[in-house]
Image (spheres, rainbow, N blue to C red):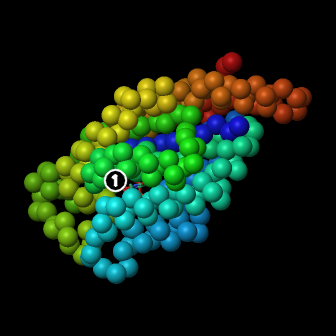
Amino acid sequence: MALFISFEGGEGSGKSTQAQRLVDTLDRSGVPAVLFHEPGSTNLGFHIRDLIKGRPWGRETISPTAELFLFSASRAELVAKVLAKQFQAPDLVIVADRYVDSTTAYQGYGRQVDLDLVQAVNRLATGGIMPHKTFLLDCLPVQGLNRVGSLQAGLFEGHAPRRIDDERSRRFEDEPLRFHKRVRRGYLELARAEPDRWTVINGAAPPDKVARAIWRAVQAIPEFSEIVSRRSAPPGRQVALMDSDDRLTPR
Ligand code: TYD
């Protein structure tokens, strides 16, 4: 079975950068890895992404329940067409830049859709396929929003705000700060409820330091050690674990 690792966090938490860095480090170490980004990664997923992010019909918002179904439809397609198969592959590391916990945090806590219903939809969409390890890149919403240059960070700092329903304000980044605070609280509650699966990392730390902490944590995952030892076994298929700065890690 593959090792499945997901990255979660609020806007500007640096999770996409870190997901990519992990895949690069795995590549350099000779461990096969795949990366996907939600929503997206299938044809239907890309269309749903355009619908949610672009809203081709204009300013009108999407209702929270419809939004829950859109993200979940994208995930169900990904699981059915790609993930379920990859999950059975031996010695593969699957890295997800967002997965089902995004739906709990954003639609459940952020949009305040009933959490039991969100969990039920999540179970349906994933077919029960859950990550072995989830990294939460945690930072204060205002720090993350500042990184992505959001309207709300400007608002928070007292700069002239643009209206939330402004034509250009269609992104999650531009939801009010209290929305992002709820999302963060949701993530932290999820992490507290399942401490074995979640590793909380300070997303505001320098990216190199974050990457090193993540790589150390990955090397401590039992399923990862099993992959490495299986791949190292036959002669000529040596796996030399690199550290996240490209140096060989003494083993
Ligand atoms: P994206 O441009 O991919 O941003 P990010 O780099 O933060 O992932 O936008 C995805 C947005 O969709 C992001 O704001 C989080 C949100 N989202 C949900 O609300 N629910 C979900 O289930 C997922 C996967 C994403």
Mark 1 nearby-residue class (10 Å; few <14, some 14–19, many ≥20): many
Residues 124 and 185: in front is 124
- Is the C terminus in the top left, top right, bottom left or bottom right quadrant? top right
Q: On the rendering, which quadrant does ligand 1 occupy?
A: bottom left
**Seen from this angle, which residue lies furthest right?**
235
- Is the N terminus in the top left, top right, bottom left or bottom right quadrant? top right
Q: Is residue 206 visible?
A: no
For residue 25, above or below residue 247: below
Q: Position of residue 119 (x, y in %)?
A: 42, 46
- Along the horizontal axis of the image, is 158 left or right of 3? left
Task: Tell me which residue sits at (39%, 68%) in the image.
Answer: 52
Q: Is residue 231 visible?
A: yes
Q: Name the residue beneath numbered marker 1.
A: 107
- Along the horizontal axis of the image, is 141 left or right of 80? left
Task: Tell me which residue sits at (58%, 43%) in the image.
Answer: 129
**Seen from this angle, which residue lies furthest top?**
251
Q: Position of residue 64 (x, y in %)?
A: 31, 61
Task: Tell me which residue sits at (54%, 49%) in the image.
Answer: 126
Q: Amino acid at mark 1?
A: Gln
- Along the horizontal axis of the image, is 98 left or right of 116? right
For residue 61, above or below residue 236: below
Residues 20 and 135: in front is 135
Q: Secondary structure beneath disc 1? A: helix
For residue 198, above or below residue 52: above
Quarter location, residue 28 = top right
Q: Position of residue 143 (x, y in %)?
A: 27, 44
Q: Is mark 1 within 8 Å of ligand 1?
A: yes
Task: Tell me which residue sits at (66%, 50%) in the image.
Answer: 84
Q: Position of residue 85 (x, y in %)?
A: 70, 50
- Along the horizontal axis of the image, is 234 left or right of 63? right
